Amino acid sequence: MTTDVTDPPPAQPPGATPPGPPDGQQPPDTPPPKRRWGRLLLKTIAGTVIMLVLLAVLALGLLYGALTTERGTAYAWHAAVKLLGGRLAGTLDGGTLAQGVQLRDVRWRSLDGNGTDIQIDRVAGSWALAREPWRFTIDYLHVGTIEARVGPSSPSSNEPMKLPQDLQLPMQLELRDVRVERLLLHQGASTTELSSFAFHGRSDGRHHEAAIDRLETPFGALTAAAKLDGVQPFPLTGEVGYAGKVNDEAVQVAGHLSGTLEQLVAELDASGMKLAGHARVEAAPFAAVPLQRATLSFDHVNPQAFAPGAPLADLAVRAELQPVESGAASTAHAASAASAAEPSAASHPHHVFGGHHAPVEPAAGFAVAGHISIVNAKAGAIDQKLLPLIDANADVRLDAHTQSIANLNVRLVRNATLTGGGTLSGRHGQLDLNVARLDLNALQATVRPTQLSGPISIRLNDDIQSLTLDLADPAAALRAQGKITFDPARISFNDVRVTSGRGRINLSGALKHDANSTYNLKAQLTDFDPLSLTSQMPARTPVTSSGAPAASGARSERQAQAAALAGSTAGAKSAAPGDQAAAIAKNTAQAAVQTEVLERRTPAPPRIAQPGARPRARPHPRAGSRRA
């Protein structure tokens, strides 16, 4: 019987096992079931995207609420205070971040105590952000008193600033009214106060304009205005003005800025208080040597116009600096400095302070050099509140690394001179001077006449300054030598010695700059008589700004001196019996001399005729004893 191969196999009865493969043969491979990884991956991606969208919508909603609602702004302010960990503090009185806020008692402080600490009593502002085009407008921003305490500054780099590539803004900006009532800037022991600051400005993104409508300084009021293009080469124009009063006399200063941000030209004109001056400065703020060329010409400059406690003077200042070849200028300048220093070292071989210093290597590149001169038409003593300077001349040189001065020649009153030179590189510098024929009596009347000569060295090393001197007057048997160091923590005296005749005083120790003004000084006196350094000449009369001496004040001072000398005889009673007579005689004689000088310089009071008495006529030259 034949079977058709196309017929289906017979069905297996229930419970029967299917026939297996023949012996010795492997069963055929069956494909595994397909896993749906693609659909699972799509679901995961879709869920993640939906979650991110929801988070973004939630963040935008929170941000919108924080910007546009007062409650959201309050939450944002409290969150910022907590996240900054005590650096920020203050009270939010109202407003929103989108339209303006009102704050009071705002403080930003440094946790380590060495940074900047800022306190603001109140802030109020109103602003808005517009679209098409994007424009941020500050309608007003009014600030009360800002008190800032600046910490110690970090060492600045000597590398020049880099010129920016673009100064355009991403949106338009307008500041209509910005005011600060008062600014107190504390830096160390000094405090600077500025007030009545008013500012406004605008920008279309490329062209920027800014103006200081008013700024009150301790010296007067300042105004300024500037315009800048934000595309290279950054054209710049501006005006600066100053107006103030010194000793009830008006002083005006006007300045003009032009050029570009890379090549800036400034011209300045000053007038008032007999002051007449003009200055022109060409600068490259982003170059290795910022000063390119300068010409100064000022007459009747009075230091009291800048500092009320400064001495009175009538200075004529001339300066002209221009570019020079660095190599030639360095060689000439080093030669002139060496020739100026040789006489000082040769005339004082005994000087052991300061030592020898290696010559400064000339810096390659751009440099400017020139001559500076100062002439004082009203030279005088310090105790007369005058400046003892007659004139000063020096050659200066400025390059990318070093500022140096050579051929310094200063003439002081009574034929005293100062010569020498020095260099300054970053925060390190030195100045070596040679003093000749210095008369301290010409500076202060209470000091005996002297003819001191010798070297003075000044060194600058970061925040530490040191002064080393060795001045001597062989004819008067006087000598002062030693080293004094000034640093932020203390003033140190190292081997300071003053010799007068056979006596001397040695001083060493330090005066600390702490809250208690702690000091640790050690002085040793050997046959030293302080009176050997003083003069018996009467004090000179101070000169006022108008040139008139203060006669009444000087007369009262002489009367007080005479009374003090006369009354000092009582102090001699407590001395030994053998010294009482000498002390009383000496003090009484000095008081008599002072009183005699006082009586001779004081005019006699006018006589007043008694009522009813007939005046007696002076005898006529020809009448002899004839009476009226």
Image (cartoon, grey):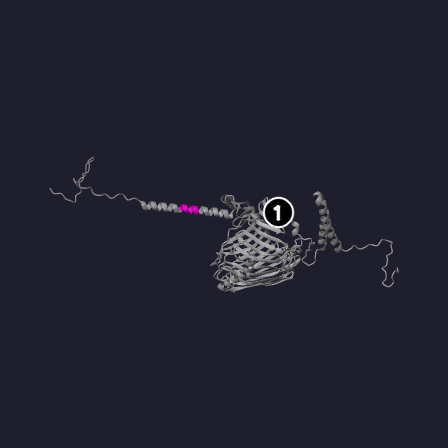
Viewer-proximal residue among 233 and 579? 579
In magenta, the rendered stretch is 50-56
Q: Secondary structure at mark 1?
A: strand
Q: Could you tell me which quadrant the C terminus lies in?
A: bottom right
Helix, strand or loop: magenta stretch: helix
Magenta residue check for 52: yes
Q: Is residue 613 left or right of residue 115?
A: right
| Residue at which label 1 appears | 525
Q: Position of residue 594 (x, y in %)?
A: 73, 52
Magenta residue check for 348: no
Labels in figure, total: 1
Viewer-proximal residue among 356 and 582? 582
Q: Could you tell me which quadrant the N terminus lies in?
A: top left
Q: Position of residue 618 (x, y in %)?
A: 85, 59
Q: Position of residue 381 (x, y in %)?
A: 65, 57
Q: Residue furthest left?
A: 1
Q: Position of residue 429 (x, y in %)?
A: 53, 55
Q: Residue furthest top?
A: 15
